[in-house]
Image: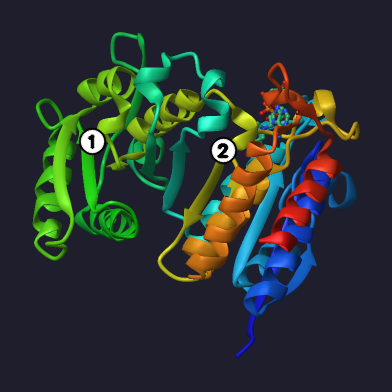
């Protein structure tokens, strides 16, 4: 039976429209092969939305996203909007989207592709075979905890304050996403905290340990964040799924991403309890190469694969896209950002055509 999905597309700014166009073609081809019917609707977000409506996330866009099964976002921002007041900048749209859809879990995989192993700054033997996922809590912790602000003390000195706080229910919901994610992978979960110093981390660790009783098929371990940072660059292969708080996840997911060395290849997913998730590349809008057919569309295409796996529960269709990406790279095709000697340089559109041809012949 044909499955029908409504997908909101947010192409945004810079290279966004170029990489989105490739991804839509790939999804259409996958839809034909797996009996999935996608109804795409495009909406404004970021700088283009500011130019058209004065706001980075118009109410109509948020409504369209809420009414869809998944949201595919490209990238937003650019120098022409950099001097606007903070509240009107494109990036505010991202925060509005996360809050508006209740996206509390951010999933960022870091996988070393054998074809691109030399793009990493780390030694081949350290990173060969790395395939990990960072599950970061996105809407709580020190970025949101109260009190926050810069206050003046009784002695007249300024004092900056942020508060790291988590309730049990916040820990519970991110924990469940992480255990479920580990179940879809190799059934190993490492919870990262600072429980030797922070009470908030002690609650985090206690609750994760409690939750593990409900997931006996997942092996839970714990690491302090300083040790986790060290292990991530010393021996990243030991990790499968990592779950951590907003601040620690912000830092560790960037470090994990850089193990791969190729920003044009990294997808991400942001999920809530119910409702649509948002799937987007880790990179930005790359204004320096926008409109020149130079962008690497593969992070966006792999974000669509994450959408199929984590948002629409179509793992076979996701596998098919990921295999096609590997095959296209195996054949020596590269965009400029991942080009190495002896490989064939393709533009964004041509990379898309190579993917479609590969999907056709599979
Ligand atoms: P960026 O990721 O856009 O670009 C960094 C470098 O990587 C550039 O040299 C760029 O050409 C290259 N690059 C990035 N993606 C690429 C791709 N798919 N193919 C080939 N090369 C690629 O980061 P930046 O330059 O710091 O930011 C540019 C704009 O993007 C800013 O306005 C920033 O605020 C915004 N931004 C948006 C997001 C988002 O939408 N989630 C994330 C990060 C930055």
Gap between marks 1 and 2 measured at Cα: 22 Å
Q: Is mark 2 on a helix, strand or loop?
A: loop
**According to the image, label 1 marks what residue?**
192
Residue at 37% across / 35% down in the picture? 249
Decide: is 59 above or below 182. Answer: below
Dividing the picture into quadrants, the one containing residue 152 is: top left
Q: Which residue is drawn at 75% across and 44% down?
A: 46
Q: Is residue 88 visible?
A: no
Element type at mark 1? strand
Disc number for residue 266: 2
Q: Which labelled disc corresponds to residue 223? A: none
Using the image as rendered, state which of residue 245 and residue 336 is in the foreground: 336
Q: Which of marks 1 and 2 is nearer the N terminus?
A: 1
Residue 313 to residue 54: above or below: below
Does the image show residue 284? yes
| Depth check, front residue: 61 or 55 | 61
Count neighbours of disc 1 (C-alpha within 10 A) and say few if under 14, some if 14 to 19, many if 20 or more. Answer: many
Q: Is residue 124 above or below residue 246?
A: above
Image quarter of the N terminus: bottom right
Whether tag 1 and tag 2 are in contact, CB under 8 A, the answer is no
- Left-right relation of 160 to 346: left
Depth check: give the residue in front, 142 or 263. 263
Quadrant housing the C terminus: bottom right
Q: Position of residue 220 (x, y in %)?
A: 15, 47
Question: Which label lies toward us, 1 or 2?
Answer: 2
Q: Which residue lies furthest to the bottom in this view?
A: 1
Please report the residue visible at 63 percent of the width from the left and 42 percent of the height from the top: 299
Mark 2 Cα-neighbour bin, 10 Å: few <14, some 14–19, many ≥20: many
């Amino acid at each position: 039976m044909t499955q029908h999905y409504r997908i909101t597309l947010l192409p945004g700014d810079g290279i966004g429209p170029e990489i989105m166009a490739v991804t839509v073609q790939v999804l259409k081809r996958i839809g034909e092969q797996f009996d999935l019917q996608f109804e795409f609707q495009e909406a404004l977000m970021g700088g283009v939305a500011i130019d058209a409506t004065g706001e980075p996330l118009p109410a109509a866009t948020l409504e369209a996203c809420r009414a869809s099964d998944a949201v595919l976002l490209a990238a937003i921002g650019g120098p022409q909007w950099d001097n606007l007041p903070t509240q009107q900048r494109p990036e505010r749209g991202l925060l509005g989207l996360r809050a508006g859809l209740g996206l509390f879990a951010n999933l960022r995989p870091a996988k070393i592709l054998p074809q691109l192993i030399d793009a990493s700054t780390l030694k081949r033997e350290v990173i060969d075979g790395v395939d990990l996922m960072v599950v970061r809590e996105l809407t709580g912790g020190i970025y949101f905890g109260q009190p926050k602000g810069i206050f003046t003390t009784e002695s007249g000195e300024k004092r900056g304050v942020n508060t790291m706080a988590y309730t049990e229910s916040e820990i519970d919901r991110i924990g469940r996403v992480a255990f479920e994610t580990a179940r879809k992978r190799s059934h190993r979960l490492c919870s990262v905290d600072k429980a030797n110093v922070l009470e908030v981390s002690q609650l985090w660790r206690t609750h994760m340990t409690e939750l593990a009783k409900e997931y006996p098929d997942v092996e839970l371990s714990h690491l302090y964040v300083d040790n986790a940072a060290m292990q991530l660059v010393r021996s990243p292969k030991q990790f499968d799924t990592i779950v951590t708080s907003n601040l620690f996840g912000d830092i560790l997911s960037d470090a994990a991403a850089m193990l791969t060395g190729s920003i044009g290849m990294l997808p991400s997913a942001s999920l809530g309890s119910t409702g649509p998730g948002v799937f987007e590349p880790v990179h930005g809008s790359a204004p320096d190469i926008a409109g020149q057919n130079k962008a690497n569309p593969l992070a966006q295409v792999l974000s669509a694969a994450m959408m199929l796996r984590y948002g629409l529960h179509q793992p076979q269709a996701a596998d098919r896209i990921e295999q096609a990406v590997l095959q296209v790279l195996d054949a020596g095709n590269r965009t400029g950002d991942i080009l190495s000697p002896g490989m064939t340089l393709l533009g964004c559109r041509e990379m898309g055509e190579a993917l479609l041809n590969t999907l056709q012949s599979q």
